[in-house]
Amino acid sequence: MPSRFDTLPHRRAIIDRRVLADALMAIEGDDRIALRRDATAMLRTALEAGRAEIARRLIEHPSRGLEAAAAQAFLTDQLLRLLYDFTTKRLYRSSNPTAAERITLIAVGGYGRGEMAPFSDIDIGFLTPWKQTGWAEQIIETMLYALWDLGLKVGHSSRSVDEMVRQAKSDVTIRTALLEARYVWGDQALYDEAAARFRADVQAGTARQFIADKLIERDLRHKKMGDTRYVVEPNVKEAKGGLRDLHTLFWIGKYAYNVTEPAELVEVGLLSRAEYRQFHRAENFLWAVRCHLHSLAGRAEDRLTFDLQREIAERMRFADRPGKSSVERFMQYYFLQAKTVGDLTGVFLAHLDEKFAARGRRFGFPSLTRSPGKLNGFTLVRGRLSLPSDDFLQKNPVRLIEMFALADKHGLEIHPVAMRAAARDAKLADDIRRNPQANALFLDVLTSHRDPETVLRWMNEAGVFGRFVPDFGRVVAQMQFDMYHHYTVDEHTIRAIGLLAKIERGELNEDHPLSAAIMKQIVSRRVLYVAVLLHDIAKGRGGDHSQLGAEVANRLGPRFGLTPAETETVAWLVRWHLLMSATAFKRDLSDFKTILDFCEIVQSPERLRLLLALTVVDIRAVGPGVWNGWKRQLLSDLYESAEEVLRLGHKQKGRSERIAAKQQALRTVLGWDEARFAALVKRLPEPYWVAEPEDVLERNARLIEESGDSQLSIAAQVYPERGATLVTVYAADHPGLFYRIAGAISVAGGNIIDARIHTTRDGMALDNFLVQDPVGRPFDDSTQLARLKGAIEDALANRNKLADRLSAKPLPRARAEAFDIAPNVLIDNRASNRFTVIEVNARDRPALLHQLAHGLFQSKVTIHSAHVATYGERAVDTFYLTDLTGDKISGATRLKAIERRLLEAAAGTPMKEAA
């Protein structure tokens, strides 16, 4: 029995095979069906009892992952042995077996390694000496049916020894599974023969190809899983930095050196003792997390989703700390272990590279110049930056930073042995933090015109980044427990720096035309790059991270070599890095007071340019799908309006002149005669012309013209510039119109991201909505558009109860329930000269806007515009309101009543729909 099981404490408390074997043999009768039924029942009881005991131990010792995984494999071993003996001795006993009637049962894959999570598949193989006999077929079939009856998920194969060798040679997946094959029960001599054949006929002389195949397989898996180990809902088994990466290292070591345990990787020189301890700690932790995942889910579940993260953090006894919740501390530790796995992979591959790739192409890397050379005292080994001696960094710690600066400057990779030395000596960075040369080199890397993202990530992987900038070290591997941020804080920051460099190089002109244009006008590049580095530096400290981050910026700016003016600007950018997105996404940009308030804080065109660039990369680096055309348009509109105000000295261009220019442009596009166009202008109020862009004015005008005397017209068309569908409703105005339309759009499966509500001078409502589907795309096929129009018509005709239809719709994101978001209502009578502005924060859900609008309808107020922003599980809906006479709402009692209704709606209190 493998040594891992030998060290398992109190094994008989999990399952006592001897007692069970006696009980199975004591079952009376000769009817095979009855015997198998009774034996299966007995084994099922033992399986359930064993699982319960393992689960109890995991609760009692929640961090003993390897022990729990070994216990599960041990339980499976014993059940298989009992079943094998019962099948061969009671059901199909062969009193005088021939040489062909031999069979051995092997464990393969992870089970073969002696590690299983509670609901892992059981991967087994049946080996026979030659072609299967009838007796062997009966044994295999009976055992498989019994295992299925036990509710186990079984992966199985049955092969002769020759077939095993042939298939292992032709299929690397089969070869990998058999690499970890372990004898479970049956004919020991047959197993020994098969193992010898595998080593001699399959394994010998093929290590180099096997290693190359496994690394290609690993890279494809990483790409499929997102190619970063810092995704906030990681797959514990398959993701980058997960268990599969550790297994790959072990497979390669086993294949190349015939090691049987990970500890033996030290003896063959692939890992140092300290690195093996890291390997063991990471493997133990990841197995603990995976076992807890299976246990909580009650099934095979390897994705660490938000709803399970909190429970596992509690199980593993992580506690809250100031500024960090228990779940954030747990996930930070998880990502630190995933980072360790990445570090070990680099070291491991360096050794393999030296041994197996000396005469050929390096593993996982393109071919580069191989001639040795020197660079500032560093050596070049086969095209990679390396060290001339093991103590090279220790002799002059500034070289820790210089190594990365040289790699960036000359476009070189860093040799894994040099990375290993940098990780070992990272603590030397403590002594050079205030060294001007070291800081100048670091700033060169940060503001590089080449690829700062890659080199900063290398610095982070080596642990040098966090030691040299300790404030950054505090956010390494730190997650934010929400559905908005896809990456840890350090990964988000490094990605943002990379995006900024790509925009500056002109690689993202199509996605960010305005940002690309203004990058050429920015006076101080390094102010911008340092601000991107520091914008989230104070997360996890408690308090407002923008204010705390500005304090960090004031302290770090001089250390990096920035002038006092540059430091002040960096601190300002960090302090206000959320201002532009909050204004663009939550406020009405057609309200000139919004622009003036924004400009009062910004104060200069240079700051405006810097803030736009920082805002764009901050949003885009949050994760895939967060940036879209609508956000780009809103930020561009705000930038252009603010730039005009700042350029003209805070004076608004004549409102009447702007309206006249828009009207003239519209008349030209429409081609209408003067009388016809004058009739349109007469019907539409002045604020309408300010609020709507020219392309929407044209679409609205044509809809009004086509509708004639109709009391209801609806248009829905894709609006590609905004990444949404524009839905326009032209209808007789009446109270409650907005909440009914909002509910109808939700019924049709749409999310409203913006709404502008207008009333014509002759009593018609002209409402423009921007709508996306639940994953942020436009409604673009005819069926969707027809459904949208039909739902609005039904709602306005009151053909069915909206509340009933909405309550029947399932939640599209049940995971949002994992987050506690207390509804909050903020009322502001200073944000606009004409309107009362109310902002509602709540957990996002279908029809939230509908319920909020219904609450406002009950409050007898007029909604002039609504602006919807979502941040993962959090929704922020902002309304511009007046009372029914068109004035601001000012009475304290009235405002309190509105606040109460909105809080009830935000909390999901069932609404009573008006007749």
Image (cartoon, grey):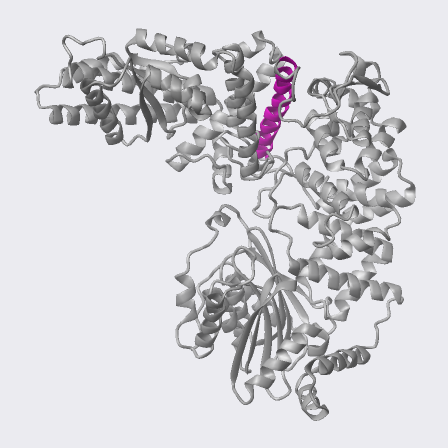
* Residue 708 relative to residue 517: left or right: left
Residues shaded magenta: 329-355
Asked whether residue 332 is drawn in magenta, I would say: yes
Residue 624 lies, in percent from the top left, at: 60, 47
Asked whether residue 325 is drawn in magenta, I would say: no
Residue 298 at least partly seen: yes
Residue 60 at least partly seen: no
Residue 84 lies, in percent from the top left, at: 24, 17
Q: Is residue 667 placed above or below 9 in the rendered structure? A: below
Q: Nearer the viewer, residue 139 or 897?
A: 139
* Residue 811 relative to residue 380: left or right: left
Quarter of the rendering occupied by the N terminus: top left
Q: Is residue 168 placed above or below 603 in the rendered structure? A: above
State the image quarter where residue 914 is shown. Answer: bottom left
Residue 642 lies, in percent from the top left, at: 80, 63
Residue 616 lies, in percent from the top left, at: 72, 51
Q: Residue at x 68, y 36 (%)?
A: 490
State the image quarter where residue 113 is shown. Answer: top left
Quarter of the rendering occupied by the C terminus: bottom left
Q: Residue at x 45, y 55 (%)?
A: 811
Total tally of numbered discs in the picture: 0
Dominant secondary structure of the residues highlighted in magenta in the image: helix
State the image quarter where residue 48 is shown. Answer: top left
Q: Is residue 179 placed above or below 366 in the rendered structure? A: above
Q: Nearer the viewer, residue 79 or 859?
A: 79
Q: Nearer the viewer, residue 796 or 250?
A: 250
Q: Residue at x 46, y 30 (%)?
A: 290
